[in-house]
Image: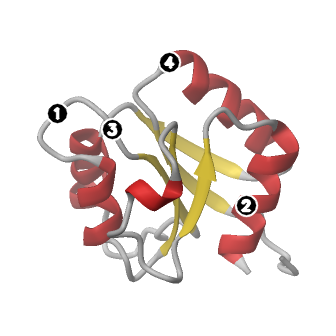
Amino acid sequence: MTTDKPLFVLLVEDDPAIREISAMILEDAGMTVHTVSSGDDAERWFEARKPDELLPDVLFTDVRMPGTISGQDLATRHSDMNVLVTSGEAKEQHAWLQADMGYLAKPYDRKALLAALRDVAA
């Protein structure tokens, strides 16, 4: 990750504690983070963006969330972006993951989160 500007991450996580801690880790690492609590909220955020607003460098989403749009739906809809998916389930249970999507198993720590995010953004 050799860029002059900080990475902009859209963090989609329904668990408030995980969302808050993950956002703090990313912000402490110098990244810009926007958080939402569901796939539905993420889609509303994408739809409300103005054409001149930057897209996130990375979409970091949990797989299972409440609402009508799952993390799988969100990742698939925005597969043209850098996508990092997280889940408490084994990666093998997510056959829909595309080769260029990152996967981070829960629970994860600071080092694993930052490494996975940087790999996806590279």
In the picture shown, does residue 60 fall above or below 109? below
The residue that appears at 87% across and 46% down in the rendered structure is 111
Identify the residue at image location x=38%, y=31%.
37
Q: Which residue is mark 3?
A: 64
Residue in the foreground of this view, choosing between 88 and 82: 88
Task: Indicate the amino acid at tag 3.
Answer: Arg
x and y percent of residue 6 in the render?
A: 77, 63
Q: Residue at x 50, y 18 (%)?
A: 16
Which mark sits nearer the N-terminus, 2 or 1?
1
Q: Residue furthest top?
A: 17
Number of other residues with Cα within 10 Å of mark 3, as a class: few under 14, some 14 to 19, many 20 or more: some
CA–CA distance in space, label 4 to label 3: 14 Å
Q: How far apart in space, not on screen, are marks 2 and 1 (Cα)?
A: 26 Å
Residue identifier under label 1:
67
Identity, as a three-letter code, of the amino acid under mark 4: Pro
Q: Is residue 68 above or below residue 92?
A: above
What mark, if any, has residue 116 been given in the picture?
A: 2
Q: Quadrant of the C terminus?
A: bottom right
Q: How many marks?
A: 4
N-term mark: 4 or 3: 4
Disc 4 marks which residue? 16
